[in-house]
Image (spheres, rainbow, N blue to C red):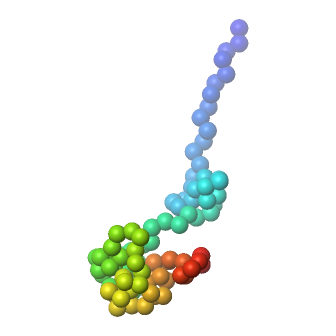
Amino acid sequence: MDAPPVQVPAPAVDRSPGEGPPGQGGQGMPQRGAPDLAAAAEELGVTEEALREALGDPPPDLEAAATALGVSVEALRNALGAPPEGGRP
């Protein structure tokens, strides 16, 4: 009498944060995540709290946020890592 086959679980795949499985961003392809608001605020010379308040609830109005912070929309987009208006980077 043969023993039933042993099922071995598949090994865990070590992925860096922001990397999805194949077919969902592709293995090794970073997915767009939330911006680092602390770093963006520092780059813009404002507090993280002021940046959060200016951005408001999603989706943010970058033009209004830039005006509230006293920075250009381009500077705000760059600090947030946002794609240029009208397209992808």
Residue 13 image point, x, y percent: 59, 49
- Residue 5, percent across and down? 67, 22
Residue at (50, 77) in percent of width and height: 82
Picture quarter with the C terminus: bottom right
Q: Is residue 6 above or below residue 61?
A: above
Quarter of the figure with the N terminus: top right
Q: Say if residue 45 shows up in the picture.
A: no
Looking at the image, the residue that sits furthest to the top is 1
Instruction: Using the image as rendered, state which of residue 66 and residue 44 is in the foreground.
Output: 66
Q: Is residue 12 left or right of residue 2?
A: left
The one nearer the camera, 64 or 77, is 64
Q: Residue at x 71, y 12 (%)?
A: 2
Asked if residue 62 is positioned above or below residue 31 in the image, the reply reads below
Residue found at the very far right of the displayed protein: 1
Which image quarter: residue 86? bottom right
The reply to whether residue 16 is in sight is yes
